[in-house]
Image: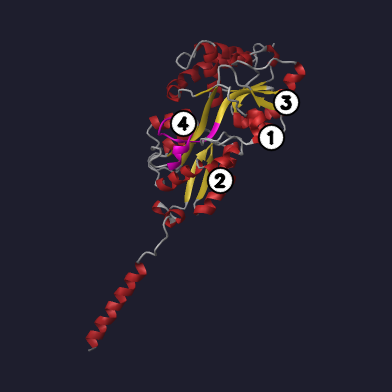
Amino acid sequence: MRKLFTVFIVLMLVALAGCASAPTPQKPGEGAKSKGKGGAKELTVAGNGGVIERTVRDVIAPKYEKETGIKINYVAGLSGEILSKVELQKDAPQIDIAIYVPVDVQRALDKGLSETIDESNVPNMKNINPDFIAVDKAAAPVFGLVITPAYNTETFEKNGLEPIESWNDLIRPEYKGKTAFSDINNDWGFNTLNALAMANGGSTDNMEPGLEKAKELAGYSSTFYKNSTQMMPAIQQGAADVTVMGSYAVGELALSGVPIKIAVPKEGVPLQAFSASLVKNTPREKEAIDFINYLISEESQELISDKGFYPVVNGMKLPEKYEESIGLKETDKTFKPDFAKFAEIRAEWTDRWSKEVTPELGKLLK
């Protein structure tokens, strides 16, 4: 009898242990919200600083964390710097999502540093305006923009200056010393070179005419700026009246009280987007894909467009407060650059610019 009782007790203890280790039933989708693949509760996103960083870190990330329980850590840096970090970390990725300029989307793909992004794993891609897609299936466009000339409207009116109707109109004696153009290492600078080539009979396959015009551009400029954090103060403080920059930066300046607006030359302006790339071999792939899908939802795009970016979702419009400064008319010409070609030739023309254009700075100011 005692043996039977002992066996009964042992069986009961085994049964209780089995119940204790059984998983708690979850509602559909609850696991992805609280943990996700690998139990990750954090994601690391790397992208530009400034308004992009503030939009993700201060607006989108807190809302996403509240909805899913997943914290978004943001690492700020220039697109090329981020690409270098991703490459260095390729065997043990610390960055889950990299937000690149279009040419670096192509470079990341060429280096095997990104995973496929399309409708099959990111459902909201079906709603995206294809004009914003830098490279097919390589990344999701998130922050829409054009790279465009812009000018101080009060200065132009006061001095009776002619409107900017061509990229060649950036090269005028009237502007000398009052310009803010970026260096070739910045995406704004490289797009300026490409546009000057187009305006003078060249193309992305033949940048030579653009380089010759860029020498004149340099002659009437006191310096080339490295990035927006240098260029925007120059415009705010009245040191520059003419520039080429991303439309979102123009919108931000206009909202701050600077009398500035974009000018769309007859040759057109390049339409593009900062795009979210899924870093290859991230151990948090599922969570990263979910966040990319969230970034291109209508909900997120409404928040992003409120910061001066063109919404990348079909049918959505730019907020009214930006229409006067960066609104695009139906008659305005835009084009999509050949980013694969950009990636192929950029090193060569960056070197040419440094050796032939930069030394011409200020020579026509005397």
Q: Which residue is mark 4?
A: 130
Question: In the rendered image, is residue 233 in sight?
Answer: yes
Q: Earlier in the sequence, mark 3 or mark 4?
A: 4
* Label 1: which secondary element: helix
Front of the two marks 4 and 1: 4
Q: Which residue is mark 2?
A: 60
| Closer-to-camera residue (50/201) | 201
* Label 2: which secondary element: helix
Q: Is residue 259 left or right of residue 141?
A: right
Front of the two marks 3 and 4: 4
Marking on residue 238: 3
Q: Which residue is mark 1?
A: 255
C-alpha span from label 3 to label 4? 38 Å
Q: Are marks 4 and 1 in contact (CB under 8 Å)?
A: no
Specify start and end residues of the magenta stretch as a single range.
Answer: 123-144
C-alpha span from label 2 to label 4? 23 Å
Residue type, mark 4 in image: Pro
Question: In the rendered image, is residue 186 in sight?
Answer: no
Front of the two marks 1 and 3: 1
Few, some or many residues within 10 Å of mark 3 (<14, 14–19, 20+): few
Marking on residue 211: none
The answer to whether residue 135 is magenta is: yes
In which quadrant is the C terminus drawn? Answer: top right
Q: Earlier in the sequence, mark 2 or mark 3?
A: 2
Residue ranking furthest to the right: 158
345, above or below 101, in the image: above
Residue ranking furthest to the bottom: 1
Q: How many marks?
A: 4
Residue 286 horizontal/vertical position (percent)? 41, 47
Going 51% across and 29% down the picture, which residue do you hit? 272
